[in-house]
Structure formats: structure tokens, C-alpha cells
Image: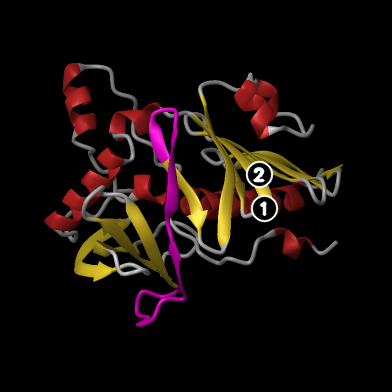
Amino acid sequence: MNHRTLFFSLSVLVICFACEPAENTGTTETTSLENNPPAEGFNAAASDERAIAIADSVMKAMGGRRAWDNTRYIGWNFFGARELLWDKKSGLVRIQMPNDSTVFLINVKTDTGRVMLDGKRLENQDSLAKYVQRGESIWINDSYWLLMPFKLKDSGVTLKYQGQDTIQGGQAAQVLQLTFDGVGDTPQNKYRVFVDQDDHLVKQWQFYRDAADEEPAFTTPWKDYQKHDDILLSGDRGQRQITNIHVYESVPDRVFHSFEPVDLDALAAN
């Protein structure tokens, strides 16, 4: 097998998710959480105040900053190609591709991990390092497709208000432009994010391979929001679907350390 085919051919890559805010315990920190402070490195100076306010309204509509910070384990199936399970607190990520018995067990905060390709564990350290990095790239891509609305004020992001426009179907929306500086696998990318003026949820995005491009490479909807624990998540991207979405309060340690198959639905039932 040519392992270049491991990746679903969507070259959209983005923000570094490793930058999670510190946990807060006191009264002052709680107030700060409610105000949705930006991650360290967010380009507030170059961002528009109105764009920042809209980003904050999105966070609130999705369940709020406290709910997002308290969310620990998230699992999902990315476009039928692979399943992921992420521990936001530790940085542990499991990626399994049932069709070829490939499993990544990595830590995106420490850039370490173990990989099984076609049912065989990688032992060569050079090959292992390469595939750990590939696993991180998969996670960056796939998690952004699911969780982007929570990441509007991440490190390296500049937000600009682009006025009002309509989404496919004619619904009015406010438009945010996201550009990036020194983060993710492809910092030259640009996004336009369409936010519903009534419910403040992201309803569409446009992806530009280069910030200078005049036309987007694609436009997809964000539909079918569902409550998962205390947050909202959307999996409908039009012709592509993110399915089997779960938020877990706890999962067994083995899911991040064993190559044995994991059933995301069974984890949710336990």
C-alpha cells in the first residue's frame, strides 16, 4: 500500500490546537472565562472589534466558553475515512482507519506517539517520527472541520469583519475573515465564515488556499447542529458528512495506548 493515500484529499490546514487556555479556579478567572479571552498570540491589535464581538457571540451560542473549556473527550468519524478521539486536556489523540488496520496513538502536545500501519507496528524511529507528524496533520485538519467555531480567537489568528452577505439559499449572515500567521500546516490559507445574525451560529464557510485568492477553493454549509453534553456541534458539510460525534466525560485509558479497535458508540454507552 502507498501510505500517501492515508490522507483524505482535502488540503485545508489551519490552526494549532495545542494552545489550550489554562484551567481557571477563582472568581476573577471565572469572569474572564465568561468574557471569552483570546489565546496567547491572537492578533487582537490587527483584528476588528466588531469581528471579535461576533466571535464571542458564536462561542456563547455554541454553549459558552466555560462549557468548551470543560469539554474533555471528543470523538468523531471524518467523512467516512477515519475515526478520531481527542483528549483536550492531555493532548492524546487516537486516529483509526478501519479499512487498512492503521492506527495513530499520538500526543499533539509532545509530538510523540506510536503508529501501526496495515496491522504492523512501526519500529524504525525515523519512519515513526514521520508518521507521528502525519497523524498530527490529520488531527489538525479533521478537528478544524468539526470545531472551528470554538477556535476563532486562537493563537496566530487575525479576525476581520467583512460586512453582510448571504449564504447559499439566500439567508442573511455576517461575515468574518480569518487569516493566520505562523500557525498550522498551511498558514497562507484564508477563511470567510458566515454567522447567522439571529442564532449566532456559523452556517457556512469558504476556504481560500492563499489569502490573496479572489475566489474560494470551495464553499460548504455548516448545518444540523446537535447538543453534545454542554456544547453544540455540527457535522453536515453538504456533500461531506462528519458523523458519529460524541462528547465523553471519561474514556478508558486503553483507547489512547492500545492498537485494539475502539467502538465510539460503545464508549458513549458506557
Q: Which residues are magenta?
A: 209-232
Marks 2 and 1, how far apart at CA = 8 Å
Residue most extreme to the left: 49
Quarter of the figure that contains the C terminus: top right
Name the residue at 41% across, 57% down. 183
Mark 2 or mark 1, whichever is nearer to me = 1
Name the residue at 63% across, 22% down. 269
Q: Which residue type does callout 2 highlight?
A: Glu
Name the residue at 55% across, 52% down. 142
* Residue marked by disc 1: 80
Determine the secondary structure under disc 2. Answer: strand
Establish if 182 lies above or below 112: below
Residue 31, image quadrant: top left
**For this rendering, which residue is in front, 56 or 105?**
56
Q: Which residue type does callout 1 highlight?
A: Gly
- Residue 231 located within the stretch drawn in magenta: yes
Percent position of residue 81, x then y: 68, 54
**For this rendering, which residue is in front, 230 or 179?**
230
Percent position of residue 253, x then y: 65, 22
Q: Are marks 2 and 1 in contact (CB under 8 Å)?
A: no
Residue 209, image quadrant: bottom left
Q: Which mark is residue 5?
A: none
Percent position of residue 73, x then y: 52, 30
Q: Is residue 231 left or right of residue 133?
A: left
Residue most extreme to the bottom: 214
